[in-house]
Amino acid sequence: MAEKDQAVSARDQAVSVGTEAVSAGDLIRAYPDLTAQIAAVRAGEVSASELLQDSLALADAVGEKAGVFLQRFDDSASDAARRVDRALADAGAEDALETVPLAPAPLPFAGTSLPLAPTTLPRAGKSLPLAGVPLGIKPMIAAAEAPTTAQSAVFDPSFYEGRDSVVVDRLRAAGAVVEGTTTMAEHAAGRPDPALGFPLPRNPWDLSRWPGGSSCGTAIGISLGIFAGGLGTDTSGSCRIPAAYCGITGMRPTRGSVPTGGVLNASPTLDVVGPMARSARDCRLLLEVMQGRAAGRGGEQDNSSEVAAPSKQHTANPGSEQATRRIGVPKQVVESDRIGSAVNTAFSQALVDLSASGFDIDYVDLPFLDELIAATMIIMIREMYEVHEESLPTRWTDYGRSFRRLAVMGCVISDDIYHRALGAADHLGALLDEVLQNVDALVLPTWPEPAPPYVFKGGTPQEEWNLTAAFCAVPHPSLALPMGFDDAGLPLSLQVVGPYSPDDPDRGNTVILNIGEAFQALTDHHRRFAHIDAEAVVSPVPDPDDSASGDSAPGDSAPGESAPGNSAPGNSAPDEGSPDDRDIARSAVLFDQLPEPLRRLGIPFDEADSTTLLALARLFTTMT
């Protein structure tokens, strides 16, 4: 049966009269991915308003438990869906774009109304490549309805105030319905701090586990079927890690191939905006719209990064004469004991599936993998500190503990080390190019293990083998694809890394999407939805500074020792020899051990801050 017929049958089952009561999400989940939803809306099988209302109902049922949305735009999304429906119903209308004002969403972070600039929205049907489909947007990316907060109390309310970023403007012009901003790790690093009161993103396959970051909510919403696509940003893996943990498809495009106007900086050298969806074909469609290569392009222009033209050398058809054929597997990964057994098993099967899809598998040497990771982390932490240098000392406790401890470490990275890391990235990129001269792309696991428990001591895990970060200091694109599940039902993920061509920046994007589409034509891992019991009781996320919770990390308190968090000492002086007195003395000793650049900042580090910073200092010393 054709896919369209399958979708229609599923839709009819979901809404047929006389059957048992329809559950929230049955309609929107009847279509396997974004592409199928678009086809159904354009064919009149379902309306954009019906899709959105079912999406909102599913969000009402399980979205809060899973922490999908930071802020929902119910009113403006409903208006946009109705506008698409009217445009599609007007068969005689000429293709056009209409500039209309958007209704502001309720603002949880500002006391006054947000002024909204007019935005470009669809009027007619033929130029709507994203006709009426709901999307989620990471709040590093400006959307006109709400301030761009990066899920932090520390943000600039004037940043793109009342305006869409370039990519969101293009999505709307293509007919997409922006349903809201999604949860994320604060300013695109670390873990959300439960003490800050923001919605906490949780893994939809196991609510006690971390969903991956920092583009958490977009991945969670796609996995649950609340929406089939959305946007994230990727600095050291922030589209691909949550894609891996949540069982969806996430892409880091070639650096410079997607405009970044209206996107907050995390690490300007490394930051890219990426599509996230159920399938590689959906990521391709979103990417083309973001680049302005699909019909319905918005009016706002962006000069902040080069936008690639369509590739003429590579085809989207994996079966054609010029299609990608040779895939390299790094020996250093498959032979490593740092890859978990479940991931190893799924990866071996993925190679069998790729071979069955017509690809030749070669094993290649990639001995500089750890050096690639180190270059990324040094560049990222240094630049993250520079972005927040002025506000970290003055608003230390307004930031979450995980983010502030990572970001402040950038002051320890000297100019010399930072520039050496930039130079090393160029050199390592050239070595990667040499490897890719003999194969069309590389494949390896996206992450060496399935999703971990939510909390790490101090909020900053330090012993992870971040295989996504290996391909961020270089401009090469990469794609995360579901490749199976472990015995506990947690998703596992395949990473595809493509070539970089300065003369054709979109070539690598095409290569990895070709591989992704071929792999997903043979497998069905990407078609599985996560399900949450709407009546389930969700346990609180443990405090990252509670010594009884989380994973051990270098520099943790000894067993039995407590590590206080943000609580301030009482007003009365502690008795001599009291636990408070000993804590103060221990904090002073830890502070004296910190690198001098940290001590000079004048920040009132507590004991837990100092403990975590000492561990991070040892980690970065090893990297440098």
Image: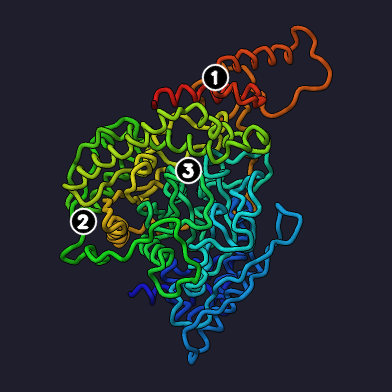
Residue 262 against residue 320 in the figure, above or below: above
Q: Secondary structure at mark 2?
A: helix
Whether residues under marks 1 and 2 lie with C-beta atoms below 8 angstroms apart, the answer is: no
Whether residues under marks 3 and 1 lie with C-beta atoms below 8 angstroms apart, the answer is: no
The answer for how far apart the CA atoms under marks 2 and 3 are is 39 Å
Which residue in the rendered view is the most extreme toward the right? 572
User: Sequence order check: which comes first, mark 3 or mark 1?
Assistant: 3
Crowd tier of the residue under label 2, counting other residues whose Cα lies within 10 Å: few below 14, some 14–19, many 20 or above: few
Q: Is residue 489 visible?
A: no
Whether residues under marks 2 and 3 lie with C-beta atoms below 8 angstroms apart, the answer is: no
Q: Secondary structure at mark 3?
A: loop
Crowd tier of the residue under label 3, counting other residues whose Cα lies within 10 Å: few below 14, some 14–19, many 20 or above: many
Residue type indicated by callout 3: Ser
The answer for how far apart the CA atoms under marks 1 and 2 are is 57 Å
User: Sequence order check: which comes first, mark 1 or mark 2?
Assistant: 2
Q: Which residue is more in the foreground, 123 or 241? A: 123
Residue at 64%, 54% in the rendered image: 158
Q: Quadrant of the N terminus?
A: bottom left
Q: Which residue is more in the foreground, 595 or 238? A: 595
The answer for how far apart the CA atoms under marks 3 and 1 are is 24 Å
Residue 209: x and y, percent?
A: 53, 41
* Residue picked out by circle 1: 596
Which residue in the rendered view is the most extreme toward the top? 576
* Residue picked out by circle 3: 267
* Residue picked out by circle 2: 356
Q: Where, by quadrant of the figure, is residue 572 drawn?
A: top right
Residue 34 against residue 488 in the figure, above or below: below
Which residue in the rendered view is the most extreme toward the bottom? 92
Q: Where, by quadrant of the figure, is residue 403 drawn?
A: top right
Residue 347: x and y, percent?
A: 30, 44
